Image: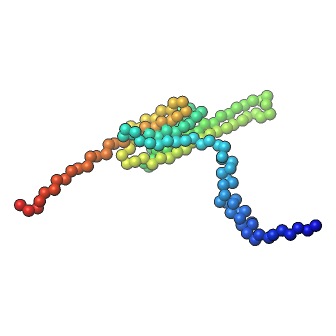
Amino acid sequence: MNKLVRFDPFAEINALQDQFFGDSWVRPLRNVSLPTTDVYTDNNQLIVEAHLPNFAEKDVDIEIENGCLVVQAERHETEQDKSKKYVVRESSSSFYRRIQLPERADSEKIEAHLDDGVLKVTIPLTPLSEPKKISVKSAKK
C-alpha cells in the first residue's frame, strides 16, 4: 500500500531556522545553575554581590580596568584514584563579570570580602554636589 506524503518545500528551511534560531542550543544549559550577581546602591556605596559557592579567596581576582570592575573566579580540581577505572579526573568552574562603574566611584577605597560563598565588593561613591542656587536680580536700577 502506497501512502501519499504531502511535500513541503520549506521543511528543510524551517528545520535549519529552528536549529540556528531556536532554543536547542540552550537546552544543555537548562540544568546548569549560573552564579547570580546583585548590583545595588546603599548609603553612597555601590555594592556588588556575587554568589560563588565552593570558591576560595585564592580563586577570586578583582581588578579595575578602563572604568569597569572586573570580577573573575576560577577553580580547578584534580582527583587521582588508581583503584577506579580512571586515573585522573579533573573539573573546573569559572565566573566572569564586568560592571561599568559610575564616574563618581572612588576606586581607591574599594573593599572586597568573601564569606560563606558570597563575594561582596563595596565601592564608595563620592556624594553628589548640591545644586547651586542662583539669585535673580533686576537689570533695572
Q: Residue at x 74, y 66 (%)?
A: 12
141 horizontally vs 92: left or right: left
Q: How is the image coloured?
A: rainbow
Q: Residue at x 66, y 58 (%)?
A: 22
In front of the other: 63 or 46 = 46
Q: Position of residue 90 (x, y in %)?
A: 69, 37
Image quadrant assignment for residue 31: top right
The answer to whether residue 65 is visible is no
Most extreme residue toward the top, as rendered? 83
Image quadrant assignment for residue 122: top left
Q: Position of residue 19 (x, y in %)?
A: 70, 59
Image height of 4 relative to 71, above or below: below
Image height of 130 relative to 139, above or below: above
Q: Position of residue 55 (x, y in %)?
A: 57, 34
138 horizontally vs 3: left or right: left
In front of the other: 88 or 129 = 129
The answer to whether residue 18 is visible is yes
Q: Position of residue 6 (x, y in %)?
A: 81, 69
In front of the other: 97 or 41 = 41
In front of the other: 12 or 89 = 12
